[in-house]
Image: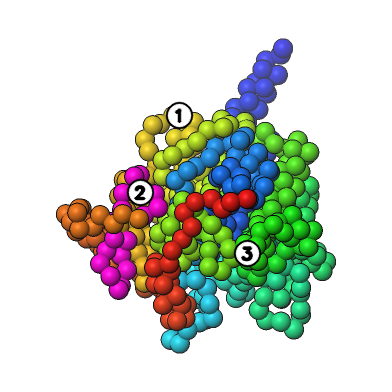
Amino acid sequence: MSLFKHILTYFFVTIYFSISPLFGQSGSEKPNFVLILADDLGYADLGYQGSNQIPTPNIDRLAESGIVFTSAYVSSPVCSPSRAGLITGKNQLGFGFDNNLFPAQPGFDPDFVGLPLTETTLGDKLKSLGYTNGIIGKWHLGEKDHFYPTKRGFDEFWGFLGGGHDYFIEDPDDNNMKRPMQSTYKKPEPITYLTDDIGDECVDFIERHKNEPFFLYACFNAPHSPMQAPEEDLKLFSHIEDEMRRIYCAMVYRLDQNVGKILKTIEDEGLGNNTFVVFMSDNGGPTSFNGSVNAPLRGQKTTVLEGGIRVPLIFRWPSTLGKGDTVDDMVLSLDIFPTFVKAAGGTVSEDYNLRGIDLMPFLTGKTDIIPHTSMEWKYTVSAAIRDGDWKLIRLPDRLPMLYNIEEDISELNDLSLQELERTKSMLKKLGTWDIFLPHPVFLEPNSWRTRQIKNYDKKYQLTQPEL
């Protein structure tokens, strides 16, 4: 080889290795991300969680081929704040997102009823790393134009902006649960059964973007009310006497079928090995409103009992993570943000002030440090703190309650008076955290608070339903 060719080769090799770090991983090396979110799913209502009543073969196979977390928590017991935490990696209380979304109450500015514009979303971060991002289904992070998904890091949106939707009907004159679907990339067809339509749009997104790194945020509204299911599915559960429970079971069954559609498409397109799939619920099941069961957990949506904040969670990434593993240590929905970003080849600077952490070093054995030993929750009038195995709950109309979660997962044995010093210490720690939180940027109706308090006094089903 001539001296000139040697010099030319050296020049190009030097340039390549100098600039390649700027671009991170190549498109073929970057994993795809699929985050599947169920809405108001009961902790007990999946086959792999022990349900004998609802067959969920697709979610069960996902669990068998991935990692199951048995102590996974969301950051709020209700939909919108939980999603705000999930999409930012922060405890949403730190930016004033305490309440569920509702039209602005007196004294509050309607322009602030949504995810604050100061916050960076997972979509924003992955987009900066070269990802195409899509959200299909329920948004529930603000309906004003400045909160729109395509202004919060997503390239495509198909779905609805509010907290719930009729499963069969759209009405252009309706301003609530029957508003027509919105889409940024096509004219939406009339809905058939909304769970099916969300599944179909997720399949379409994957097929259209299979040749580039993508992030699909698959936000099913099932099994959130209204309680509606196709007749053919209701027949499968005709033996269940309770009507609401019967409809609920049919809704979860159809949810599972559409999770199966997504997983099959990933495999059919040859993307299975390097697609990071996460499945979870946004909060615990609202047993009084949709017939869900959170057994063995006590409580439901809106409460900071385990039944409101502890959820099913599955990770699957075949090229990197093992399968069939179970993690019993506490993890948070807030961990998904940094875990995805780091897996995509990105970094998260300290000024993001994330509450979540990258779970990959822990899951791949590079560290044996437990991800989290403590967490705080607050939703309007209720608050809780977990510190190791201990959990304290604070309500405005009674003494604080203290439970050993490791020994008493159903929170039946209040040890606050027997462990008085621990109660005082944890109550002070919770209060110190609380007083540094900012004011909520919006409020929900005051009447909702009394309903929340009543949910702490109800009796809950703590065992799996009979067939």
Disc 1 versus disc 3: distance between alpha carbons? 46 Å
- Above or below, 387 against 162 in this view is above
Is label 3 or label 2 in front? 3
Q: Amino acid at mark 1?
A: Gly
Q: Residue lying farthest top?
A: 1
Label 3 vs 2, first from the N-terminus: 3
Residue 287, percent from left and from top: 53, 63
Label 1 vs 3, first from the N-terminus: 3
- Bounds of the magenta span? 393-411
Q: Which quadrant of the figure contains the N terminus? A: top right
Residue 408 within the magenta-colored segment of the rendering: yes
**Label 1 Cα crowd, 10 Å radius (few <14 / some 14-19 / many 20+):** few
Q: Which residue is denoted by mark 3 in the rendering?
A: 242
Q: Residue at x 75, y 47 (%)?
A: 261
Q: Which mark is residue 408?
A: 2
- Above or below, 443 against 192 in this view is below
Q: Amino acid at mark 3?
A: Asp
Q: Which residue is denoted by mark 1 in the rendering?
A: 365
